[in-house]
Image (cartoon, rainbow, N blue to C red):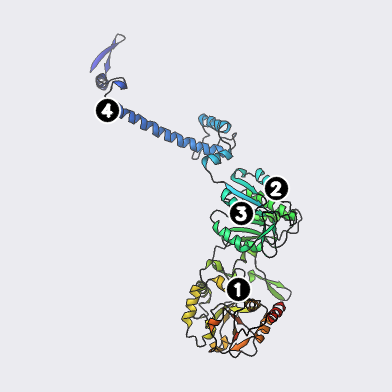
Amino acid sequence: MRFCCLGGRPHRVHRSAELIETRSRGRPRCPRDRPPRARRASERARAGRRRSRGAVRGTRLQRAFVAVTSHPPQIAPRMRGSRRRPSHRLRSFTRRIHSTCFSPAEYHRHMGTQRTSILFLSADPTDASRLRLGQELRDIETRLRLASARDAFDLHHRASVRVGDLTQAIFDTKPAIIHFSGHGSAAGELFLENDAGQVHPVPPEALEALFALCKREVRCVILNACYSQRQAIAISKHIDHVIGMTQDIGDDAAIAFSAGFYKALGAGRPVPDCFEFGRTELRLYNIPEYRIPLLIQRPTVKHMFLEARDYLVQRGRYFERVFSPEYDLFVKLFAEDGIGRGCILIDPDAYENIGDILDDVYTNYLHEHVPILSYGKLWLISKSAGCLYPIVSWQWLLDSDNTRHEELWTWSRKTRPSAVDLNRGDECVILFNRTDDLAFKKRFVMIACNSRLIYNIAHSWNIKRIWILLSRLTEIPTIEFDSNKYVYKILIDLMDIEEPMKHGIFVDSQLSESELASLERFR
């Protein structure tokens, strides 16, 4: 223990203070006086502490920046996890951001936040009736500008769209929503413009192929054109939400629907709600065309069962099948007898081949009614359209003793639904064989020909025309039939046939063009 004199009185100095004083005597006070190695080590330590403090400060500032830019400047937001209001430093930082830094729109661009791109396409050919497309565009811009989420949308416009402009506009804007406003035809075509400004029709198959390539970016397509239901159904195979028109629609109705749709979209509503708001806008303006817009959503299930009470509507003493628009994308299977009162819905575009459809139908709905591997023997699916067209290969009719069932299974695994004209919206019947196989197959006939005109008549779904065609063809026995001589082979179920056919195979007997033309004109 040592003593020192402070103000004339001795005071004790602790031993630790003595040690500190002793150790500090040999340490250089200036960092430049230290050895080079020690000086570099201390500089690295100080730099690490500065980086850690800067990272923490940067994280706090970034969090504060996000909180501030999402609130008005007069409201000081509370930090998450704290009950106190922000300190004076955060409040001053808030004022600096709102006065000198970013607006909300600039914040989205600066931070790289995803904004929804809307592409408005319009085409008004000179040889078609004039439309008020400019008024529709102005109403959409106004509704988005007044919306609370206006900074989340980018609206792009392309006028007088030609075929080449369509794909280029999609590449340039990368839209999530595509809105087309213009003309459509009752044949299912969409009217763009050619280089002369006149009508250039685009078929639904071309639009389907285009949107199949854009399905990763595009989430919604609006076809504000007359008779655009067929195009909407084709596009909905690849796009989540598609809006079309079931028939012709006037300018006032089209403009009002667009205004109501984008008003709800700017408020942050989902697409189905926006569609309903668009229809409600028509009703508020007393426009009777509110039933014309149609929303088609891409199915998320491959198959489902629909109870009869969900689609049967009583009309006097009879019941009528009335399905909601969301079921238009399914093939409807009705049982001839069995499996209760209901309907099986199948999405044909969700399957690679016919065999997968048969597997799902049997496993989920028919396993209690028929044994396994009995398709073609005890049950059969036929497409119903005036006549019944069985979904089997033509060899099935020639297999009278059912010994070539393996060929039918192989055919079903190699055949796509579109190859047998099984498309969305079709109606089919499940036929059950309650008699022997020979009697069951005698209700079917096959027409073999090389003429495309005869093929079209056989698929005309007019039972009277088909009966007249059969009377002018030649019926031959199975042994004499050479499948290599004929290009087209069509199976038809004649249903309520009084006298079964002898052989059931009818071949082209070189009918004249005049005879075929008279058959085609027959109603």
N-terminal-most mark, 1 or 3: 3
Q: Which structural element holds mark 4? A: helix
N-terminal-most mark, 2 or 4: 4
Kind of residue at badge 4: Arg
Q: Residue at x 62, y 58 (%)?
A: 242
Q: Which residue is mark 3?
A: 164
Question: Image quadrant of residue 205?
Answer: bottom right
Q: Quadrant of the C terminus?
A: bottom right
Give the distance between the C-alpha atoms of the residues marked 1 and 2, in whole angstroms.
Answer: 45 Å
Q: Quadrant of the N terminus?
A: top left
Question: Image quadrant of residue 510?
Answer: bottom right
Give the distance between the C-alpha atoms of the residues marked 4 and 1, in whole angstroms.
Answer: 87 Å
Q: Which residue is mark 4?
A: 37
The answer to whether one can see residue 176 in this image is no
Q: Which residue is mark 2?
A: 139
User: Which-is-in-front pick, marks 1 and 2?
Assistant: 2
Give the distance between the C-alpha atoms of the residues marked 1 and 3, in whole angstroms.
Answer: 47 Å
Q: Is 67 on the left-hand or right-hand side of 16?
A: right
Q: Which mark is residue 342?
A: 1
Structural crowding at the residue carrying mark 1, measured as other residues with C-alpha within 10 Å and reported as few (<14), some (14–19) or many (≥20): some
Give the distance between the C-alpha atoms of the residues marked 3 and 2, in whole angstroms.
Answer: 27 Å
The answer to whether one can see residue 391 in this image is yes
Kind of residue at badge 1: Gly
Q: Which structural element holds mark 2? A: helix
Structural crowding at the residue carrying mark 2, measured as other residues with C-alpha within 10 Å and reported as few (<14), some (14–19) or many (≥20): some
Q: Residue at x 49, y 73 (%)?
A: 414
Spot the residue most to the right: 286
N-terminal-most mark, 4 or 1: 4
Task: In this rendered view, identify the residue nearer to me: 45 or 115.
Answer: 115
User: Which-is-in-front pick, marks 4 and 1?
Assistant: 4
Kind of residue at badge 3: Gly
